[in-house]
Image (cartoon, grey):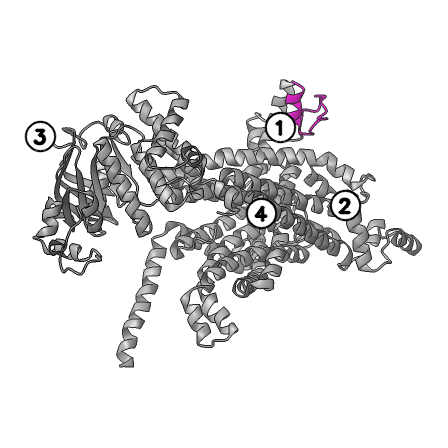
Amino acid sequence: MSFPLLRVENLSASFTTYGQTVPVLHGVSLDVPARSQVALVGESGSGKTVTMKAIMGLLRQPPARITSGAIYYDGADLLTMPEKERLKLRGTAMSMVFQDPMSSLNPVFTIADQMATILKYADRRLGRVRSSRDRMQRVYDTLAQVRMRDPERVARAYPIELSGGMRQRVLIAMALLSETDLLIADEPGTALDVTTQAQILKLLKDLVEARGLALLMITHNLGVVRETCNSVYVMQKGVIVEKGETAALFEAPTHDYTRSLIDAVPRLTGGRRFGTTEMPA
Amino acid sequence: MTGTSLAPQEARRLSNAYQNWYRFSRNPTAVIGAAIVLICILAALFAPFITPYPEHVGAVVNFRARHQPPSLTFWFGTDNVGRDIFTRTIYGMRISLLLAFVVLGTAVPIGTILGLLAGYFGGWVETVIMRVTDIALALPPLVMALAVAAVLSPDLINSLLAIAALWWTWHTRLIYAITRQIRTQEFIEAAETLGASKFHILFREILPNCVSAIAVKTSLDCGFVILVGASLSFLGLGIQPPTPDLGTMVAQGAGFLPDFWWESVLPGLAILFVALGFNLLGDGLRDLFDVQEVR
Amino acid sequence: MEFLLFLLRRVAWSLLVLFGLSVVIFIIARAMPGDPVRLALGPRASVEQVEQLRETLGFNQPLIQQYGIYVAGLARGDLGRSLLTEQPVANDIRQTFAATFELVLSTITIAFVLGVPLGVAAARYKDRWPDNVVRIIAIFSAVTPSFFLALLLQILAGYVLHILPTTGRLPPGLAFSADMTGLITIDALLHGRLDVFFEGLRYLLLPSIALAAATMGQIARITRSSMIDVSSQDYAEAGRAFGIPERVRVFKYMLRPSFVPPLTILGLEFASLIGNAFVVELVFSWPGMAAYGVRTILQKDLNAIMGVVIVSGVFFVLANLVIDVLTGIVDPRIRIRGRR
């Protein structure tokens, strides 16, 4: 078996507040092979966001502390590599789609400004030279790729001039600006209405498949997982309690917690279990 | 049943008071501020007993001891007619505190009531009160006091009047903002549904929720009123000589700078000290009560 | 478009405040106890003289009509005649206002140039030593009376260190007339007189620092809390995830959205800034409007005093209009929706 693009190995972390140390991750291990879509599922407080932040290098230390384990990206340990090396990866090789389209865009800058700035510093980190005109072209192209009808108008707009769905697409476009291999998505679209969320997920899935990206999807909603991912890790109280291929896991969940998560997924058909109802391909 | 259900409530209230006290005592800003304020108030109250030369408050002249530097006999030195500056500073503090208490004693209740009315009733009541507030905010209290002093006569009472006539606006704005937030909350709706009187809602439901904000704001304001008052007397519009006043003392001493620096610097530091105490106390209370509305 | 409406609303508000101001001042000048005519002529004037002046000033007409005459005068820029200088008050104020304006401008510049970085540093190192230092600076600058700080600066920089001049706007021997804007530093630059510019700056420095301290402390505090607010927003975090350098993230992505509260506070504090200018100008013999006001008040020069009060109020209102426009430029939410 080849080494996966991202491997989290035996990761443990704790938080210290008011002099009390609370462990939040207990030996979490997960693999995201290249070109595959993996979900990390759990309810709020299960530790999935901490895991995500640890991978992205966004954990504030203190109060957080990684007590043991390793995070390998393309074979190199992110936790031991020099900060400078790591900065080169963040926002370029590995990128992130933020969850809340209302608060994740800076309200006082235009979309064009925010996207061009991201690209500018990504270029600088990678030692790429690009004129500001080319940079704007790249911004428009990326906005077009997330199916914005009028990219130049969207680019000129401020966040408050866009709808929630449009802002979420801008957030996806931001993550795709640079040539990314790994995309980490934090519950994309949960702040939107169901129809828009479905469109966003479809868009994300199409883009990931078309570009051959690896996707790590952080979510509490197994329904989302079934639509977008081929394997699943279920997390509870800082421990991975179950993992497997999506279909197999839905077919025969072994852990009670997974079963309760599956039961929590709203469904239209009358079947008692997903295993017994027809699943769309 | 009632007896047993009251007991834990009582215990909770006690432990709340204890928690508040604990958090207060762990907040150095609040503790230092409270200590300074307490020292100033006590000194002002017992001025005749703690000052070495209480007779120097009046128009006493002692030319042989003029312009003495600080020493064991005269802690803060003496002024140009030989009066003990320490004594006069303590008495001056009296005037400053009196000024703050009188101004805020009138401005805070008026400002609070107007803020409650504007915030709760809305409509034309709100429009009238808040527009008047806007107008009053445009006038610098110091300039206004100058104008009033010019028309009437330059003395403490008129200055007080002028400051109080503008100061209520800050409290109105604060209480208005809080009341507007509270008005939409469910316990107000519940009280309205139960047929509570407007008076009850304003003063028994909303007002208690403003108390901590008022306390913080008032404490901070004490310091600022003292500063404005001192500026007025520095300009010669405060209490008239020979009664000691900190601002007047700084102004008079300024004529003898830099050789006899203590004559203006020490009374000036006294103003700073009082204002610092109230400011630290207000700052500490803001942290303690977690009132973000007061800036 | 929305912003235009927002501005129109603010202009209407300003007009309303100005109207209110004129009423308040009219009441102080005419309706309060004390006889302005007697005040103007002094205690030795005869009854006939008083009656005659009363007639010429229209004081025998009903109050409403008097108010009408008064406002009509204001609208023409007529503030009456000063008893002290025997010049029209409007002229006196025009001559002195430029000095005050220059002082206030440089004060605001200093307050922002020092206050904002202090606030940013405090927020960046929250609860660590820079935060505590800024907190101490902010508290002390808020509680030090301006006149006292002015005196201290005068002793320290003027008498002890002999590094800066302590009175006036320019050295007595230097011939220069600020004939374009009235601001010495600006006019010196326009005339290409660098020597005058630097002299002017040297004279401006101490009074500006004395006046700026209180506002600077406020701005530092507000910038701090507003930066802390913004730093907990997702968009501040997003900058990190996209690998944007810390410097750009703090000074571009976080500072600009944090910038409206300090501007707002400046607007609110502007009245007390003008008030403090009075004492600071007096200490430094700065030939501004405030010094003029204080001089005339001690002389009971009623027209001059009311003129100063009115101009102070108008200054406040206009400054707040400018600040409103600035907030719209800084924050598109205000520009587009007319609010935040």
Majority secondary structure of magenta residues: loop
Secondary structure under the numbered disc 4 in the rendered image:
helix
C-alpha span from label 1 to label 3: 75 Å
C-alpha span from label 1 to label 4: 33 Å
- Residue A79 visible in rendering: yes
Amino acid tagged 3: Ser
- Residue at image mark 2: C75
Judge depth for marks 3 and 4 and give the one in front: 3
**Residue C340 coordinates in the image, percent (x, y):** 48, 47
Identify the mark at residue C203; answer none if there is no mark. 1
In magenta segment, residue C189: yes
Specify few, some or many for label 2: CA neighbours under 10 Å numbering under 14, 14-19, or 20 or more. few
Judge depth for marks 1 and 3 and give the one in front: 3
Q: Chain of mark 2?
A: C
C-alpha span from label 3 to label 4: 87 Å
C-alpha span from label 2 to label 1: 35 Å
- Residue at image mark 4: B85
Judge depth for marks 2 and 1 and give the one in front: 2
Magenta span covers which residues? Answer: C169-192
- Residue at image mark 3: A2
Judge depth for marks 4 and 2 and give the one in front: 2
Front residue of C18/C298: it is C18
Amino acid tagged 4: Ile
**Are circles 4 and 2 on residues that touch, CB within 8 Å?**
no
